[in-house]
Amino acid sequence: MTLLLSDISDQTLRLLPKAAGAYILAIRLYRPVSLSQRQFAGKIVTPGTYLYCGSARGPGGIAARVKRHCAADKKQHWHVDALTTRPAGQVTAALAVIGGDECQLRTILCDEFDLTAPIAGFGSSDCPTCPAHLLAVPKEHLCGANILKMLVGIVGSQP
């Protein structure tokens, strides 16, 4: 099952599945973010639109993880928290895929929409195959939420 939230609010976040799987966040970054994690020292993520592919296998599943990412104020734990904590940026849309795989979603995004990773290793420190799980949406592309809408049809047709 795939669920797209193109509007993020307390009400729509309640629709997220509490099952294990993968998700993609569309993130709007309003100001430059200087990354503080040691492996990214000196790297800056510039304002723009980004897609972040993640997984949720623990208690509360996709719902718990995406709700946490959407919280305006949170202790930074994952790389992506630096981009989703206001006032720097916020999650504008989310795609949940029950039983999905974050690496497969990332591959589809790169292959279908020609997206690239702006910071090597960002969000993929525990992944042996992906160069990063954060992808930049070029200004000439559609907004992140529209890419997620198109992705619903692609993911739904995958075996």
Image: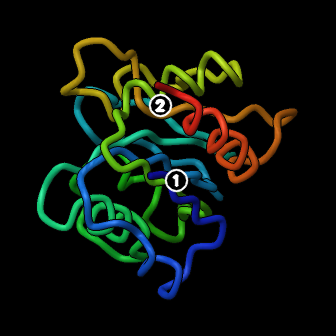
Kind of residue sitting beneath label 1: Leu
Residue 47 shows in the view: no
Q: Residue at x 24, y 22 (%)?
A: 127
Q: Which amino acid type is marked by label 2?
A: Leu
Q: Quadrant of residue 7?
A: bottom right
Residue 81 position in % (x across, y down): 35, 55
Pointer 2 with pointer 1, Cβ within 8 A: yes
Q: Position of residue 113 (x, y in %)?
A: 71, 24
- Give left or right: position of 44 versus 56: right
Circle 1 is placed at which residue position? 95
Secondary structure of the residue carrying numbered label 2: helix
From this viewpoint, which residue is outermost toward the bottom?
A: 11
Q: Which mark is residue 24?
A: none
Above or below, 93 against 143 in this view is below
Mark 2 neighbour density, 10 Å: few (under 14) some (14–19) many (20 or more)? many
Q: In terms of image quadrants, where is residue 92?
A: bottom right
Residue 4 in the image, given as x and y percentages of width and height: 58, 59
Answer few, some or many: residues within 10 Å of disc 1's Cα (few below 14, many 20 plus, some between 14 and 19). Answer: many
Residue 28 shows up from this direction: yes
Residue position marked by numbered label 2 in the rendering:
105
Choose between 55 and 44: the one closer to the eye. Answer: 55
Q: Label 2 vs label 1: CA separation?
A: 10 Å
Query: Residue at the top extreme?
Result: 129
Task: Give the left or right position of residue 33, taking residue 48 as reference.
Answer: left
Name above or below for residue 78 compared with residue 109: below
Secondary element under disc 1, as helix, strand or loop, is strand
Residue shown at 39%/53% (left/top)? 82
| Precedes in sequence: disc 2 or disc 1 | 1
Say above or below: 132 vs 27.
above
Q: Residue furthest left?
A: 59
